[in-house]
Amino acid sequence: MFEMKAFLLGAGLGTRLRPLTSRLPKPLVPFFDRPLIRHAFDACREVGCDDFAINTHHLPAMWRDEIFGIGGKNWAPSGERGGNGEEVILGSVDDLPLRLFHEPELLETGGGLRNVRHWMGNEDVLVHNGDIFSSIDLKQLIAAHRASGNVATLALRSEGTAKHLAWEAGSQRVLDIRNMLGRAPGTHVFTGIYCIHASLLDFLPEEPVVSVISAFLRLAEQGKLGGVLLDEGLWFDLGERESYLDAHQIPGMPKPCGGRIAEGADVTSSIIGRNAEIGRGARLRNCVVWPGGKVADGAELERCIVYSTDVASGCHYGADL
C-alpha cells in the first residue's frame, strides 16, 4: 500500500458523449450504475491513496447531487481557496477527504494541476483521467515512479488506436509524444493515468490555460519522463458513446439490482439502474437505463441509452432517450 494523494480529472466538457453530458458531467455518467469516476476513486483508494481532489467545470452542482453525485449528502463549503481564488468544496467519500476545485474557466490538464498546487504540497500525486475505467496495476505504476526519481511516470499500453508515445524499454523512459520533438514515432498508448511529483509544475508554461503535455515534452527532452508498461488488466476510454455502451458488456462486473422489471418484459445484456422501471412487455437488448429511468409498456429498444427523465417509448435502435 502507498500513502499518496490522488487527483482525478473531472472538468472536461464531454462533447463526444452528448447528449448524455447535457444532464451530467462526463465523469459522473453512470457506469454499472455508479459514477464512472467513482471506479477510479475506488482503484486509487485500494492502493492506499488517502487524500483526493477533483477539478470541476461543467454542471458543477451535480457533483453533490444525492442520486448522481460522487459524495451524496456529505458535503459542506470549507472556505478554502483554489489557485484561481475560487472556493473549494470539501467533503468526504468512504471517510476519505475529497476536495472539489471548481474551474469557472476550463484550465485544461496542466492548468488544472497548477490550480491544486497548495493541496499538492511537495509530494507525489497519482493522476487519473475521469473518463477512464481500468483494472491495471496501479501499485506497479507508483512503485516504478518512486524508484525512478523521475518527475513524471506514465502508465502505457502496447495496443490501442492512439500510439502517440515513443517509449524505450531499456531506459523505461518516454522519448517523444506525437514525434513533436523529432526523436521517434509513437509506439505505445498513453492510458491517461500517471504519477507526478509536484515539481512538474515548474515545467509548465506560465499561461493559466495549458495542457500537461507541454510539461511532459520538456521532461522528455531532459530524460525525466518515465513510462511503465501495464498491459495486464482491463483499460477502456469511455469518452464516446459506443465505447461507453460496449464496456457495459464486461464480464464479471457487479450488476445493479435496484430496478423494477414488470411481468412479461424481456431484458437481455442490459444494465438497469437503481429505481428504474421497465414496463410490461418491453424488450431491451444491449441497453443502459440510468437510475430512475423509465421504459414504457411494449417499448422495443436495442443499443439504446435511457438517460433523461422522459419515458422511453416506441421502437428504437442506437438512440439516446
Image: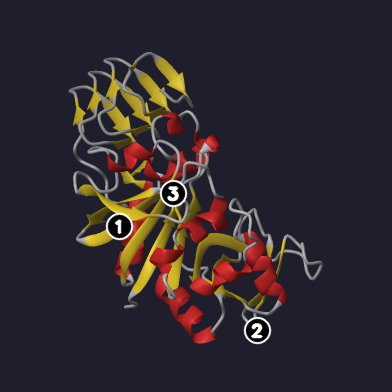
Please name the residue shown 62% across and 69% down the image: 203
Counting residues from the N terminus, which is met first, the one under dot 2 or under dot 3? 3
Query: Is 107 drawn above or below residue 190 in the view shown?
Result: above
Residue 267 percent location from the top left of the image: 30, 31
Pick the residue in front: 171 or 262.
171
Residue 61 percent location from the top left of the image: 33, 37
Q: Quadrant of the rendered structure where residue 225 is?
A: bottom right
CB under 8 Å between discs 2 and 3: no
Q: Label 2, label 3: how many angstroms apart (C-alpha)? A: 32 Å
Question: Circle 2: is it few (<14), some (14-19), or many (20+) Cα within 10 Å?
Answer: few
How does the figure colour the protein chain or chains? secondary structure
Which residue in the structure is indicated by mark 1? 98
Image disc number at residue 253? none
Pick the residue in front: 195 or 188.
195
Please name the residue shown 42% across and 39% down the image: 25
Which residue in the structure is indicated by mark 3? 10
Which residue in the structure is indicated by mark 2? 171
